[in-house]
Amino acid sequence: MMMSLRWWSYLGYLLVGLLSVCIYSKGYESGKSAAGQGIRFGFFMGLFFWGGQLLLSYPYMPLPNHIYLNWFAIGKFEFTLLGFILGMLHKPRA
């Protein structure tokens, strides 16, 4: 059952990716370091996404706290790394 519905997760990844690029490009500040802006963006997006996701699921999934802390740390690292990559790839319009 779960494997037949996995395309929803692919659609979710695509949607989060596209929305992240749109939000980043709207808040881009010329004259500042692209790498720094990307890292900052990824840090706050990770905090928003993983902080909200784990706080909302904590009451419904009784798992040990270290699992939640690890998910949070790894998720924040992932978003920060992706923000850095986005910052390096983003080319603002002239």
Image (cartoon, rainbow, N blue to C red):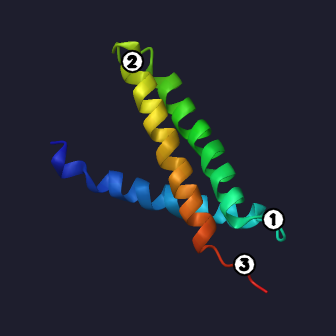
Residue 30 in sight from this viewpoint: yes
Residue 19 in sight from this viewpoint: no
Tell me what residue is drawn at x 34 percent, y 51 percent: 9
Q: What residue is shown with label 3?
A: 92
**Tags 2 and 1 touching, CB below 8 Å:** no
Task: Answer with left or right where residue 53 lies relative to residue 4.
Answer: right
- Label placed on residue 32: 1
Amino acid type for the residue under numbered disc 3: Pro
Query: Height in image: 58 above or below 47?
Result: above
- Label placed on residue 66: 2
Is the N terminus in the top left, top right, bottom left or bottom right quadrant?
A: top left
Please identify the quarter of the rendering in which residue 87 is found: bottom right
Q: Secondary structure at mark 3?
A: loop
- Label placed on residue 44: none
The one of 31 and 14 positioned closer to us in this rendering: 31
Mark nearer the N terminus (2 vs 1): 1
Q: Secondary structure at mark 1?
A: loop
Tally the numbered discs: 3
Circle 2 packing at 10 Å, graded few (<14), some (14-19), many (20+), is few
Circle 3 packing at 10 Å, graded few (<14), some (14-19), many (20+), is few
Amino acid type for the residue under numbered disc 1: Lys
Is the C terminus in the top left, top right, bottom left or bottom right quadrant?
A: bottom right
**Tags 1 and 3 touching, CB below 8 Å:** no
Mark nearer the N terminus (2 vs 3): 2
Tell me what residue is drawn at x 63 percent, y 53 percent: 39
Tag in front: 1 or 3? 1
The CA distance from mark 1 to mark 3 is 12 Å
Mark nearer the N terminus (1 vs 3): 1
Q: Secondary structure at mark 2?
A: helix
